[in-house]
Image: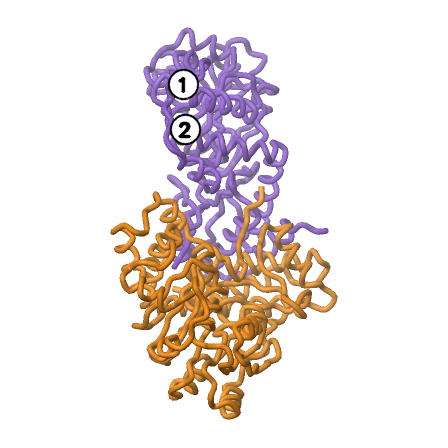
Chain colours: A purple, B orange
């Protein structure tokens, strides 16, 4: 008998309340039930996105939301700045190129955040840039960008929009869409929204909608057409009904906790995870700005990170993540976003301690867990 | 956001597979579907009980199974020996008295097991004893009896039956109903059977059935009438259908693991829990024969055990159990039976460490967890 524990950076754990809601009898999406459901979900998404902008709900993985956020705002030949600080920044570049966008890529060494000055420089070089694409939290390296500082640069520009991949950031980090003036924010269901994969969400500002009038490269991800429907609490194509039913419950739970508490919980858990990792004698991979969504951990010398990953899974039923591309074998990653609490961090650290010991690495069993307990206990 | 963790000595955790099975559409108990289901469940229960005897399935809590195991085999004025080594031994005595049975009670100090010699002595004093009642595992103290040694005493006696409360023992400890010749074994659904409460199970030997011919004190718990129905894969009264559907799945999971593995898992986890408790500087309550189903832990001097219990629950979402009667405030109890694995022990120890620290007790955070990790990790 071995239970399964899910600490991957998506899909993440789904609360039983949400699973139960999704097991409700199917409703029809062209019936009044759906309109009522969708109206509630739209209002709650605006709360989570901290915006009064449209927040589109798409039957799609997060990447579909990214694709739409390129295709709807840029036409072939348009210029874009893309920050590439990991696998998902690289993806912005690939999507832009596949739609004929002229890309100025800012390449940042994996493990670091982008320096906002690099964006200022790139914009000076190309003042006719239509859009800047960044990650709020780069999932491949566990590094967070200073989204606010970057938004401050782009907000005053009349003809440039900021598009933020917040797939592992929204509901983890305090991303103030309206206050900071972020034009497009993309996220997915299977991260801090505590749902299975299958929904993407995109918020769109007035400034971004103006660009959408000129671009029209897609059929399924046609945001204008989608928004026309969604403003009437309908969707252009068949929506993923049961996921939206689950979304309503997930948003109810998040609202009950409150935005500030949600962010503080992630700060607490991420900090305990990082300090716990250090107390086991390991190092975290980010050189700066570690994300509160997940922790990328450096495999110690002589230990293959993929072995840590696979042994966590095979011997202990713990699903984490390995490294991607050139980080494969060098790091392993443990998420602490969404439906997570104190004991998720304790279990993850405990599993890591045991695996390292199993692999012959000298580690004081209980040291990392003890450090996390010190930080997570609730003194009277 | 705080998740709930269930480490009480019943109800215990229910596997998602079982919850899903119980959510299946209702079937009718007088229809062929039920006959097929019940036949499977009966065969699998015999496997779990290690018997070819009838194993009755009752819509009842465990205490109902205990009541039936008195009322069906003893008549007013009959003599019984009852071993009272805790709350549930005391209950055997109360049930016997309420049915007019003349009770010779062997009182054992809480924290100790019964010495089989005491049973020999009591039988010598009352050779016309009809039944001996014991607990295989006394839930109030976390002590296990030597059921085999006791069975060896009673098996040769032609006119005395052994009735074993195995409510927190069956599926945890190796209880060999037929090999040891135990006449009546009682258990409940909400312990190692990994189900919600609501079902009691009673296995009945030929020797016990002979006594049942002379006793007839009950209507609902009439085992003869019940057995007549159940031998035809029916029940005398309306059965708890969804629990029986869940039971089929729980038994499937247990069979997949195998009896020997189940017992070994409980040995491993219980041992790690006890050694972990000691490594935090605490003592376990049992003076001998600790049960592998749960660990009763002595509250340290100056710390109220009820405070540990309530703080585990309120601050950490962990439901354990306090002490009962004169042990209230002196001990707290953590179960590790049923649907439990390595990380249940890790979490429970971690929660205890944090609570003790919160309450001002000097404890090296991580010490107990580290000890458990050492014992539970899976070296290559």
Measured as percent of width and height from the top left, residue B231 is found at: 28, 64
Q: Residue furthest bottom?
A: B124
Answer left or right for A206 relative to A372: left
Q: Secondary structure at mark 1?
A: helix
Answer left or right for A348 relative to A229: right
Report the front residue among A2 and B117: B117
Residue under label 1: A70
Report the front residue among B314 and B155: B155
Answer left or right for A18 relative to A51: left
Residue A241 drawn above or below residue B209: above
Residues tagged by mark 1 and mark 2 found on one chain of the structure: yes
Which quarter of the rendering shows the N terminus of chain B?
A: top right
Whether residue A216 is visible here, answered yes or no, is yes
Q: Which quarter of the picture shows residue B319?
A: bottom right
- Total numbered badges shown on the rendered structure: 2
Report the front residue among A55 and A209: A55
Report the front residue among B165 and B336: B165
Residue visible at 62% across and 38% down?
A264
Q: Secondary structure at mark 2?
A: strand
Q: Earlier in the sequence, mark 1 or mark 2?
A: 1
Measured as percent of width and height from the top left, residue A192 is found at: 50, 35
Measure how far apart labels 1 and 2 are at the Cα level.
Answer: 18 Å
Residue under label 2: A199
Residue visible at 46% across and 54% down?
B196
Measured as percent of width and height from the top left, residue A89 is found at: 44, 29
Which quarter of the rendering shows the C terminus of chain B?
A: bottom left
Subunit ID for the residue under disc 2: A
Residue B127 drawn above or below residue A210: below
């Amino acid at each position: 008998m071995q239970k399964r524990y899910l600490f991957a950076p998506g899909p993440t754990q789904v609360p039983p309340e949400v699973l139960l809601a999704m097991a409700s009898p199917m409703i029809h999406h062209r019936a009044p039930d759906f309109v009522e459901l969708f109206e509630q979900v739209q209002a709650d998404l605006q709360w989570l996105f901290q915006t009064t902008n449209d927040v589109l709900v798409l039957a799609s993985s997060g990447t579909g939301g990214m694709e739409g956020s390129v295709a709807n705002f840029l036409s072939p030949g348009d210029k874009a700045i893309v920050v590439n600080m990991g696998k998902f920044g690289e993806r912005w570049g690939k999507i832009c190129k596949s739609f004929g966008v002229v890309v100025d890529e800012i390449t940042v060494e994996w493990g670091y955040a982008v320096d906002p000055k690099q964006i200022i420089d790139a914009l000076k070089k190309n003042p006719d840039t239509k859009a800047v694409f960044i990650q709020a939290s780069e999932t491949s390296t566990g590094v967070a960008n200073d989204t606010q500082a970057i938004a401050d640069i782009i907000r005053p520009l009349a003809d440039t929009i900021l598009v933020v991949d917040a797939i592992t950031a929204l509901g983890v980090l305090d991303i103030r869409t309206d206050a900071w003036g972020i034009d497009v924010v993309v996220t997915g269901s299977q991260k801090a929204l505590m749902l299975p994969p299958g929904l993407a969400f995109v918020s769109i500002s007035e400034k971004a909608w103006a660009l959408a009038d000129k671009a029209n490269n897609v059929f399924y991800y046609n945001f204008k057409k989608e928004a026309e429907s969604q403003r009437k609490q309908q969707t252009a194509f068949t929506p993923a009904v049961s996921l939206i039913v689950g979304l309503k419950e997930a948003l109810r739970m998040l609202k009950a906790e409150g935005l500030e508490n949600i962010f503080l919980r992630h700060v607490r858990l991420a900090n305990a995870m990082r300090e716990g990792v250090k107390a086991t004698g390991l190092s975290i991979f980010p050189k700066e700005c570690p994300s509160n969504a997940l922790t990328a951990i450096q495999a110690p010398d002589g230990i293959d990170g993929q072995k840590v990953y696979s042994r966590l899974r095979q011997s202990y039923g713990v699903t984490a993540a390995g490294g991607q591309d050139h980080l494969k074998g060098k790091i392993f990653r443990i998420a602490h976003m969404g439906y997570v609490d104190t004991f998720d961090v304790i279990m993850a650290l405990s599993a890591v301690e045991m695996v390292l010991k199993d692999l012959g690495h000298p580690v004081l069993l209980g040291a990392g867990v003890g450090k996390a307990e010190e930080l997570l206990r609730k003194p009277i």
